Amino acid sequence: MSESLSGATLAFQRAMPMTRLLDCGMDFADAQSLFRRTSAGEAWDLVAEALAQAQLRRAAEAAAAGCKVTAAEAQGAALADLLFAQMAFNHDNPRKRALYGQLVAATRQLCEWSEGRMARVELPFAQSHLVGWLVRPQAVQARGTVLVFGGQSGWGVAYLPIARALARRGLATLLAEGPGQGETRLNQGIFVDVDMQAAYSRFIDFIASDSTLGAPGIWGNSVGGLWAARTAAVDARIRACCVNGGLAAPVLLPFRTFVEQAGAMLGTDDEAVISENFRRMSFHPARDRIACPLLVLHGGADPLVKPQDLQPFLDAADSADATLRVWEDGEHTLYNHASERTAWVADWFAQRLDVESMR
C-alpha cells in the first residue's frame, strides 16, 4: 500500500470504528484486540482473520460438546471478524476473495447448526445468480419478511444481528447480497450496471413465493437505502420501506475508500463512468413515488449524508405513514445507536407487516 502502516491503520479504524464493529456482531474483546494490535503495527486483515479462527475453534468445540447456543454465538462472532478482515481490501484481489470464501464457508456451517432457521438462497438473474441468506423466526409462520442489505461495503451477514432482532419479533429476514456486493459480485460477476430495482424485486419474488414468509418489507442501509427506495417505488408488493443513511443522488465523495469501493461495485476505476452510473441510479421524487409506509433514518453526525441528501425520499411519500427519525449525534447508519435503532425499526416493521399479512 502507498500509505505508511500507521496511515493505513488510521484509515481502517476510521472506516471501521469500534461502533461499527459491534453493530455488525463482533465480540467486544475481539474489537478491542483488533484496535490494540493494529495500533501496535500488525496488519488489519491478519489480526481479524486470527481472531476469527479462534472463534471458529471455540464454536467447533462447543458444537462437539452439544452446546449449540454457544456454538452459534461463537460462529456469529467469527463471521463478523471475517467480514471486517476482507473489508481491508476494496478491490477484488486474491486475498479479499480468499477471506470472503472463509466467510461463506463459516456461514454455511452456521446454517447447518440452525436446524432449518437459516439457509442460503440463490436466485437466477442476468445469466447468473443473486445470493442471500434467509433467517427464519422460531414460529413456522413468519409475521412478515424484511429484505435487508447494505451499500458499498456492508453485505449479507453484516446484518445478522438485525436478523436476530427481527426474528425475536416473529419476522423473517432475507440478508441480500445485491449487484456489486459479496458473492453476487465476487463469484457471480453481477455489478451495479444492471437494473437495480429488478434485481431487488427478484428477492421480493422469493419472499412472495413462500406463504410462510408473510408480507415483504425492505430495509436498505447506506447507499443501499437508495436501492430500497427505488425498488419500493416500482414494486407494489412491498408493504413497508426503511431507508437508513441513504443518498438520493449519490456522487463520488472525496474519500479514497469510497471511490475505490464504488469502482469495485461497477467493475471499473473510471471515475467518469462511475459518476454516470450514479446519475442513472439516482432517486427522483417526481418519478419515483413510494406508496407504502416509509421510515427514513438519519444521524446528525454522519459525515457522508446530509439532511438534503435524504429529503427526496420523504418528498416521494404518498402514504400518510411517512416518518423521519433523527439521532442528532448519530454516526453513518447509526452505528453508535445500534441497539436502539435496530429495536425501533424492528418494532416498526413488525407493526406494519403483521397487519398487512393478516388482511
Image: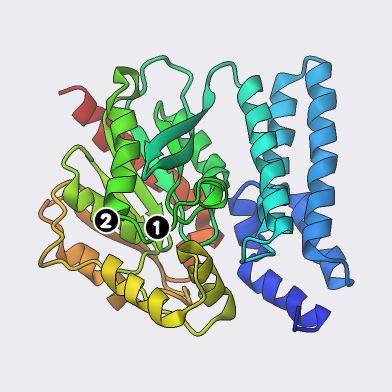
Name the residue at 78% across, 30% down.
59
> Seen in the image, is 299 located left or right of residue 356?
right
- Report the number of discs: 2
> Seen in the image, is 343 located left or right of residue 278?
right
Q: Mark 2 or mark 1, which has the lower sequence index?
A: 1
| The quarter of the displayed image where residue 106 is located | top right
Q: Position of residue 39 (x, y in %)?
A: 83, 72
For the view shown, which residue lies furthest in the front direction?
Answer: 127
**Pointer 2 residue:** 229
**Pointer 1 residue:** 224
Q: Position of residue 20 (x, y in %)?
A: 60, 59
Q: Is residue 331 visible?
A: no
Q: Position of residue 139 (x, y in %)?
A: 43, 16
Secondary structure of residue under mark 2:
helix
Amino acid type of the residue that numbered disc 2 sits on in the rendered structure: Ala
Amino acid type of the residue that numbered disc 1 sits on in the rendered structure: Gly
Name the residue at 47% across, 56% down.
180
Secondary structure of residue under mark 1:
helix
Q: Where the N terminus falls, by quadrant?
A: bottom right
